[in-house]
Image (tube, grey):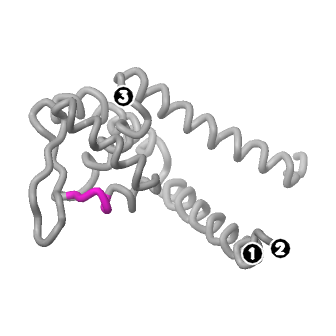
């Protein structure tokens, strides 16, 4: 068996990442949604209610501006509504029309994801998640020097 070099590893990792990204982009387009609107609906669907814009941002790791634009679009289209929470919090809820859209565009994706998940053995599921966390942790640790140096230097 041929040794896995760093270059082969990083090429395949990037290819996998981009292929997965393309998979979800195609699903969003098929549903007539922008990527941001698709992921915003996905986050609303998978979050325990009630959900705020801040909650969605924490899950999606998208900019506040991107999420805000997606929420405004979904609100204009009658897919979501905002309700007042404590203080200045605004909760986001799917309207009846939004529930129909989510049932058509988001729920089937989640069902596909679940079926793929269930095809993995239990130890494969745990290993996939553990290795993803470990690799990210190592990337963050190894990149500390890059982030600690001023870009002006």
The residue carrying pointer 3 sits among few (fewer than 14), some (14 to 19) or many (20 or more) residues within 10 Å by Cα, namely some
Which structural element holds mark 3?
Answer: loop
Q: Is residue 139 above or below residue 51?
A: below
Image quadrant assignment for residue 77 = top left
Q: As drawn, is 136 to the left or to the right of 71?
A: right
Query: Which residue position holds label 2?
Result: 153
Which structural element holds mark 2?
Answer: loop
Q: Which label's residue is closer to the chain start, 2 or 3?
A: 3
The residue at 18%/65% (across/down) is 89
Tell me whether circle 2 and circle 1 mark residues in contact (CB < 8 Å): yes
Q: Nearer the viewer, residue 9 or 122?
A: 9
Query: Which residue position holds label 3?
Result: 33
The percent position of residue 61, horizontal first and vertical second, equals 46, 56
The residue at 26%/48% (across/down) is 44
**Mark 2 to mark 1: distance in Å?**
6 Å
**Part of the protein shown in magenta:** 51-55
**Mark 3 to mark 1: distance in Å?**
39 Å
Q: Is residue 100 above or below residue 145?
A: above
């Amino acid at each position: 068996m041929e040794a896995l070099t760093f270059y082969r590893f990083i090429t395949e990792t990037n290819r996998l990442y981009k292929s997965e990204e393309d998979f979800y982009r195609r699903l969003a387009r098929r549903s007539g949604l922008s990527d941001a609107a698709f992921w915003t609906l996905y986050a609303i669907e998978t979050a325990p209610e009630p959900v705020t814009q801040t909650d969605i941002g924490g899950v999606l790791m998208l900019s506040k501006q991107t999420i805000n634009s997606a929420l405004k679009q979904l609100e204009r289209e009658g897919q979501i509504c905002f309700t007042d929470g404590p203080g200045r919090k605004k909760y986001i809820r799917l309207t009846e029309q939004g529930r129909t859209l989510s049932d058509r565009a988001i729920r089937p994706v989640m069902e596909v994801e679940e079926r793929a998940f269930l095809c993995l053995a239990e130890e494969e599921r745990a290993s996939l998640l553990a290795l993803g966390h470990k690799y990210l942790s190592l990337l963050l640790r190894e990149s500390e020097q890059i982030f600690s140096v001023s870009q002006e230097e």
